[in-house]
Amino acid sequence: MAQASSPVLPAAIGDSEFDRDTAVSLREAGVYDADLSAGWTIIHAVNGGYLLALLGRALGDALPHPDPFTVSAHYLTPSVPGPAVIRTQVVRAGRTLSTGQASLFQYDENGAEVERIRVLASYGDLDALSDEVRTTAEPPAMPPLSHCIGAADAPDGSRPSIPGSSAITDRLMLKLDPTTLGWAVGAPSGKGEMRAWFGLADGRDADPLSLLLTVDALPPTSFELGLKGWTPTVELTTHIRCRPAPGPLRVSITTRNLAGGFLEEDAEVWDSADRLVAQSRQLARAPRG
């Protein structure tokens, strides 16, 4: 008689694919070695949110405070899977906040370092913050997770044909609000909106570091504007507001202005306790399609 298989337990924070792929190794004071995983690539390059989390982990080790509060990144050249080095500097270490900067480098065909991304960040202790909240922000109005659509739910031929890697989608639990999925069936709404339920595919709960990935993990709003293709980030600033509760996240991203070949994306991330846990704004280059 065959025995029932044991249920697969969700990955734990600190012991998941995300944690392994954002691991850094201290080479010397302020210098860390890393390996950019091909599992977090999209179209032509390594995902910008994954890179932000990788540098965030290095800064969390270099600074005296544990949690990212605000992280601002400038993406200088596209990153590719493979070895990298992260150089960090403590700018200021205060009682409640510390500030540092970090740059990630890879190597060209001659072995010379090429800077990929530069970050300035302030860290603190989220557990030490006041519980007081005064806000007019509200969680996004979305259908239940069971009524939203992931990559595996899409009928054959309903997804757009975009050349390049989509490896990152296998590492995410991403269920999109059907009202922001017109682009997938050739009928974009013309509104710069994208909403989704979000988690990691192995069930790992969110923490402040993974929120740096979350803000840049949805399809770009340019798809709903009728533009397909790579939408490379130029600058991304993320604010982490509190430690997320266990369970899936809701992410809402909007674009109000595409001009001169560039667009902004404003993101909000809400946890299962209806708290706004992260916000971001990025400037990206619009696809040419």
Image: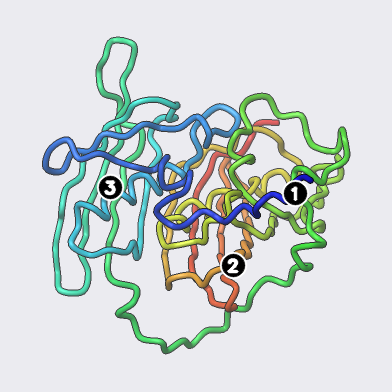
| Label 3 Cα neighbours within 10 Å, binned few <14 / some 14-19 / many ≥20 | many
Give x and y (percent) for residue 203: 58, 55
Numbered-mark total: 3
Three-letter code for the amino acid on which mark 2 is drawn: Gly
The disc label shown at residue 116, or none: none
Which residue is at a point 29% across and 71% down the rendered structure image? 125
User: What is the quadrant of the C terminus in the image?
Assistant: top right
Instruction: Tell which residue pokes out farthest to the left in this image.
Output: 29
Give x and y (percent) for residue 190: 78, 51
Rounded to the nearest angstrom, the CA distance separating label 3 from label 2 is: 26 Å
Q: In which image quadrant can residue 77 be found? A: top left
Give x and y (percent) for residue 24: 29, 41
The residue pinned by badge 1 equals 150
Instruction: Tell which residue pokes out farthest to the front in this image.
Output: 1
- Identify which residue, 85 or 232, lies in the foreground: 85
Which of the marked residues, 3 or 2, is nearer the chain's N terminus? 3
Which residue is at a point 20% across and 57% down the rendered structure image? 63
The residue pinned by badge 2 equals 247
Three-letter code for the amino acid on which mark 1 is drawn: Gly
Give x and y (percent) for residue 53: 40, 49
The residue pinned by badge 3 equals 58
